[in-house]
Each structure stands twice: as C-alpha cells, then as structure tokens.
Amino acid sequence: MPSYKAPVDDVQFLLNDVFHIERYANLPGFSDASADVIEAVLGEAAKFCEQVLTPLNRIGDMEGCKRQSDGSVTTPKGFREAFKQLVDGGWIGISAPVEFGGQGLPMILTQLVNEFLCSANMAFAMYPGLTQGAIAALIVHGSPDQKALYLPKMIAGEWTGTMNLTEPHCGTDLGLLRSKAVKQSDGSYKISGTKIFISAGEHDLADNIIHLVLARIEGAPQGTKGISLFVVPKILPKPDGSLGARNAVACGSIEEKMGIHGNSTCVMNYDGATGWLLGEENRGLHAMFTMMNEARLAVGMQGLAQSEVAYQNAVAYAKERLQGRALSGAKAKDKPADPIIVHPDVRRTLMTIKSFNEAARALVMWTAIASDLHHRSEDDKIRQTADDHMGLLTPVIKGVLTDTGFANTVMAQQMFGGHGYIAEHGMEQFVRDARIAMLYEGANGIQALDLVGRKLPKDGGRALQAFFAEVQGFIKEHGADATMKPYVEPLGKALSHLQQATMWFMANAMAKPDNAGAGSTDYMHLFGLCALGYMWCRMAVAARDKLKAGANGATERMNSKLITGRFFVERVLPETAAHLARIQAGAASTMELPEASF
C-alpha cells in the first residue's frame, strides 16, 4: 500500500526562512499565527492525513460512490467517519472569518493543509475544498442575511458547498448555458436546467449541500453578460437555520470516471428548484470568479500534491528495488544487485520530480501570501500589487503545476516498471487522479489563453512589469555573489527568454492573433519555468544563509536544497529556450493545414 509523509520540514523552511512570515505579524490573522500555532496546525494536519486519509485513498478508489434508487449517494467506507474528524478539528474554517465561526488564520495555512489533504486522498479533499470555495464567494457577494444563514453552518462543516457551471452542451463557453431562473413574487427564483461534472454534488457526509448555480434570468441578455449566480440549497433552510423541505434538485447519475472515484461527480437536475440571487443580476460570472480563482489555485496545488505523493513512493521503491549494478562499480556488494537509485537515469527522473515539487510549493505559497495581503492589508498599494500578482500567477500555477504534476506521476510510475501498472502499488491511481486537474476549473489551454490574452495586457502590463522588475532586482542584488552565480546566471537567461517571448507577441500577435493562440501554452510553461527558477534562487539564498548561521541541525537538508536547486537550473530551466523557439515559429504551420487533411 502506498505511504505518505507530509513535508512539514520543507513547509517550515519556506515559511520561516524564505518568505519570513513574521514580517506580516501586523496583519489581521497573522498576529494569531505564532510559530507555535503554525507548528501545531501543520503537525496535527500531517497526523490526520498520514494516519486517517492515506489508508482510505485506495478504498475510495476501489469502492467509489454509489447512487441509491432514491437519488441519494453513499460515499466509500470510512469517508463519513473521516469527514467527521475533519469537521471536529475545525479544518474547513481555518482561514474563515471569526464572526462566522472560523479561526481567521492566514489563507496560506489553509493552502498548506489542503496540499497535505490532497496528497493523502485527493478525492476526499475535494469535499471540504469545494466548500471553502463556496464560502469565499458568499463572504464577498452574499447579502448579510445570506451570510448569517449559510456561513456558520458551512464553516462548521455541517453543510457543504458546490459550484455548478458546466452543462452538457457547454463547458468553457458559459455564454451558451441554458439553465434558466424565473423570478417569484417573494424575491426567490425557480431554477431549471441540468448541470454536469458537479464534484461533491450529492453525498452522505453533511446534513445539507449548498449549490452555487449559474443560470440566466428570464429576459436577460444572451451570452456571458446575461448570467446570474444563485444559492440553491439541497434542503431549504428555515430562517433559524434548521432544515425544512427538500428542494427540487437531485442527482440524476454519478459520472463514470477515470479517477477520483471517492468523490461523487454528479449530473445535477434542477426542476424548478428554489434559489436566491447571489450578488447582482447578470453579474454571475463576476461573482463566480471569486470562487474560480480560489479553485484554480487549489487545483494547481492538486497537481503538486499528486506529484509529491507519487515521488515519495517512487523514492521508497528505488531504494529497495535491486536491479543491475552501478556503472561506476557495485555499491551493495553484499547483495545480488544494487538498488536502482544508484543509476543515473533513475536519479535524473527522481531529481526532476523533486526539484519541481519544492519550487512549486514555494510558488503556491508566494501566491497564497499575496492572497492574504490582498484581503487583509489596509494599504491600497500593497493590496493592488498583491491582486496583480494573483491575477498573473493564477493561470500559470493552475496550468503548469497540473501539466507537470501529471507528467511527474507518470515518471514516478515508471520507476516501478511493470509493478507501476499494477493497482496494489498505488501508482496508477496517482496517475489517474492527477489527470483530472488538467481539465477542470478551466482546461489548461484556456489558462494559457487567459494568461496571454487577458493577464499580460491588463492595466498596461502592470503585473507583468512588476514580475520582471522583481526578478531583475534579485539578479542584480545577487549576481556578483560567487556562491549564487550558478543559480542566478541560468535565471537571467530564462528571464531573457520570457522577455523575448513577450516582445515577440507584442510585435506579431496584434495583426495575427493566431500567433498568440499557437504560442500561448509554450508561453505559460516558459513563464512557469522562470517563476520556478526564481523560487529556487530565493530558496538557495535562504539555504546558504542558514548554513552560514550554523543550520541548527539542518545542515544535510540545506545542502540538499542547494544541490536540488542546482539540478533544476542546470537540467530543467534550460527548457525555456525550446519554448521560446516554438513561440517565435509562429502559427503558420499550425494553422495552414486544411481541415480536410486532419
């Protein structure tokens, strides 16, 4: 059976030595997140994930969710008990407002805990994860009455949440949706339509499920400008929060899926269900994107999480599996063969995954801190800068971390040879579970188009220029340091490639938009590599400084950081050149072939 150990030491290094979380102690929530509190939160989360959720991962995959004849859904064995432990521990509301029952701690702690949850059991983690997204939308767009009614129950985990966007005939192009809303005399709406791919749409983990549903009010404009967002409970709550009658919403079926079997992905039928407007009429996408941005960051974390757990199991196997002798001579002379970890190509594979995981975790944390600054700082300039950062990095994190995370699970599976193809080792489940993250919350090609078409030119390129300036400032500050030269020089080349690609788009995409479309995915990955390289340079500085200061028993870990970072900048970061070459090739060969020739 696969194992998992939460990377608590790595997280602590990033929090304390790279990002210096103590700098934000003056912000709401951060003042309560003392070193002792953070250590306790991470330690308890690790214990829960390692001891409770990891053993349930394969059970959930094998059993899946089952729809009963009355439309109810039963989750796999052990899920209900585990969810109760999650709720009792207050994990859903770690960062939720105190006035609604949350703990008010920084969002970065929620992101870190969610990584542990997703590595241990991704299908299970989606139940609280979607609830947190719905909570975020209600906090920003809910009326005072809606907040008072729904938030305390959802933060406590008594009720869960979902997001309902996709319909059988439309996915990304939500302007095509057909779900309709008819206004009633009491101010409520009757919602009718069918939604598909609704994760956690029906289950037995909580007393109620609060669906956030996109629909078009009768008479509203066609396209995206006529979409509104509605709160549609599974069971209609009474004003005092107790449960009343069953609403006209039901799970029509459970999707037969490639992975995440432990999560109930439902077809949801709304047959005149009662709902209430969330936010303004015809501004549903604006309200939903509050949830979507949180969700996309969380999905990027899923890519990292599956890469991490797959890596851990691949390393354990590589240390045990005997196969052949080292090219430089036998290492385990008392055994019939050497463990495969002695072979350079095995190490190349493991180092590729390891170097990505550590930088990706830093990138997510950097962006989660920006989210906290945006929501908690009273300084308008800081909030704007943080919002710019999130807008620019969110599609990169979602697209690059899930593309690469999936590729890494496949590479980790390869370490097992034929055993990786066998279910009992668990590697093929990681591959299947990781695949969905590339698809939902906006397929990765859409993330790339969003980055190139919307995020780069937004506000005159303000966010992009800020990123360039920060990385250039780092290179200037550390470029003359001999100990940092092996890291900074490759980063400088990567940044140059990113800047060249940006300038090429400016010169060649305005007149021919297909040039931007054809190069967008390469640009997203080029940007991602540059951002990950920057994270490694920051980690290298922190590790070097920690070693100079004595490392406090962490000498081996800090040396490991420096070596792993050097591997990334030497063996992975140069891929930026290939991405630049493909971008500069333009769209001609991509678009010229007649459709009939495909």
Image: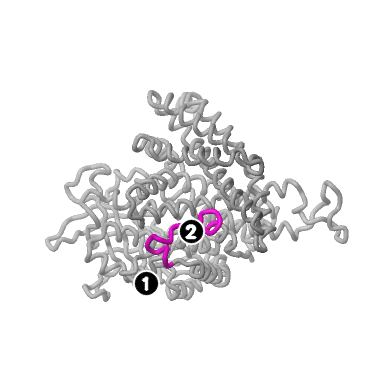
Q: Which mark is residue 461?
A: none
- Report if residue 261 is visible in the image: no
Q: Give whichever of 199, 353 is nearer the camera.
A: 353
Q: Is residue 169 shown left or right of residue 405?
A: left
* Residue 23 part of the magenta-drawn span: yes
Q: Is residue 73 above or below residue 333?
A: below
Q: Nearer the viewer, mark 1 or mark 2?
A: 2
Does residue 478 appear left or right of residue 158 in this picture? Answer: right
Mark closest to the chain's N terminus, 1 or 2 = 2
Say if 407 sits above or below 254 in the image.
above
Q: Residues within 10 Å of mark 1 (few under 14, many from 20)?
A: many
Could you tell me what secondary structure mostly forms the magenta stretch?
helix
The residue that mark 1 highlights is 156
Residue 21 numbered mark, or none: 2
Q: For the magenta stretch, what is the residue range?
A: 14-32
Q: Quadrant of residue 208?
A: bottom left
**Spot occupied by residue 458 in the image (x, y as percentages of width and height):** 35, 37
Q: Amino acid at mark 1?
A: Ala
Q: Looking at this view, name the residue that lies furthest to the left.
A: 185
Which amino acid lies under the numbered mark 2 shown in the image of this protein? Ile
Residue drawn at point x = 38 percent, y = 71 percent: 157
In depth, the one of 81 and 526 nearer the eye is 526
Residue 308 in the image: x percent, y percent? 59, 56
Q: Secondary structure at mark 1?
A: helix
Vertical placement of residue 127 versus 80, above or below: above
Q: Position of residue 142 (x, y in %)?
A: 26, 60
How busy is the neighbourhood of tag 2: few (under 14 within 10 Å), some, or many (20 plus)? some
